[in-house]
Image: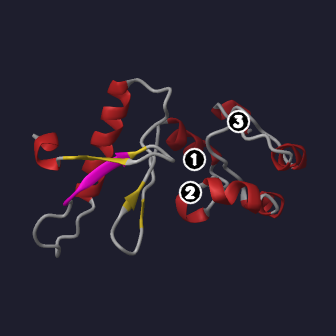
Amino acid sequence: EAKKFGVEFVGGDDLAEKIQGGWLEFDQVVATPDMMAVVGKLGRVLGPRGLMPNPKMGTVTFELENAVKELKAGRAEFRVDKSGIVHTPIGRVSMETADLVENVDAIVEAILRSKPSSAKGSYLKKASLSATMGPGVKFDLSTYRS
């Protein structure tokens, strides 16, 4: 069923065993609730990489078509830590500059749209981008948004 929605890799115990062996050539993991017993064993491999399926994120569902459509369309998720710092990937090194700029635009707009009506003043104060293991590069939001 998942193959007809455009999923590249489909499997059960065989795919879980392959992932346990170190194969990680995929971007997202979607699972049905009945397969979570198998996927749960992969927590040590998938968890640190942010790939573990999660019902809150919509990656554990019987509605595979909707989940796959959203992921293929480029759904982005961002997390905020307790000090108010937003963590989210915006792209990969292999992407074109224009695509990265478009992704930054989308993330900034999503953050600004999520501002609660009760929040006063400037909601987004500072921003910087960094590679996974690189230094952060600050950029001015006032000139960026204009």
Amino acid at the residue labelled 1: Ala
Q: Mark 2 is on which residue type?
A: Gly
Q: In what quadrant of the picture does the N terminus appear?
A: top right
Q: Nearer the viewer, residue 74 or 19?
A: 19
Name the mark on residue 20.
none
Counting the numbered discs, the total is: 3
Identify whether 120 is placed above or below 19. below
Q: Which residues are magenta?
A: 125-129
User: Badge 2 is on which residue?
Assistant: 58
Residue appearing at x 23%, y 64% in the figure? 115
The residue singled out by tag 1 in the image is 67
What percent of the width, then of the height, locates residue 78? Answer: 42, 56
The one of 14 and 7 positioned closer to us in this rendering: 14
- Who comes first in sequence, dot 2 or dot 3? 3
Q: Is residue 18 magenta?
A: no
- SS at badge 1: helix
Q: How is the image coloured?
A: secondary structure
- Looking at the rendered image, the disc whose residue lies closer to the viewer, 2 or 3, is 3
Earlier in the chain: of badge 1 and badge 2, it is 2
Q: Is residue 100 visible?
A: yes
Expressed as whole percent of the image width and height from the top left, the position of residue 140 reads 17, 47
**Of 135 and 66, the residue lying toward us:** 135
- Res 104 quadrant in image: top left
Q: Give coordinates of residue 60: x percent, y percent.
A: 65, 58
| Cα–Cα gap, marks 1 and 3 | 19 Å
Decide: few, some or many residues near mark 3? Use Cα within 10 Å; few <14, some 14-19, many ≥20: few
Nearer the camera: disc 1 or disc 3: 3
Q: Which mark is residue 25?
A: 3
Mark 2 lies on a secondary structure that is loop
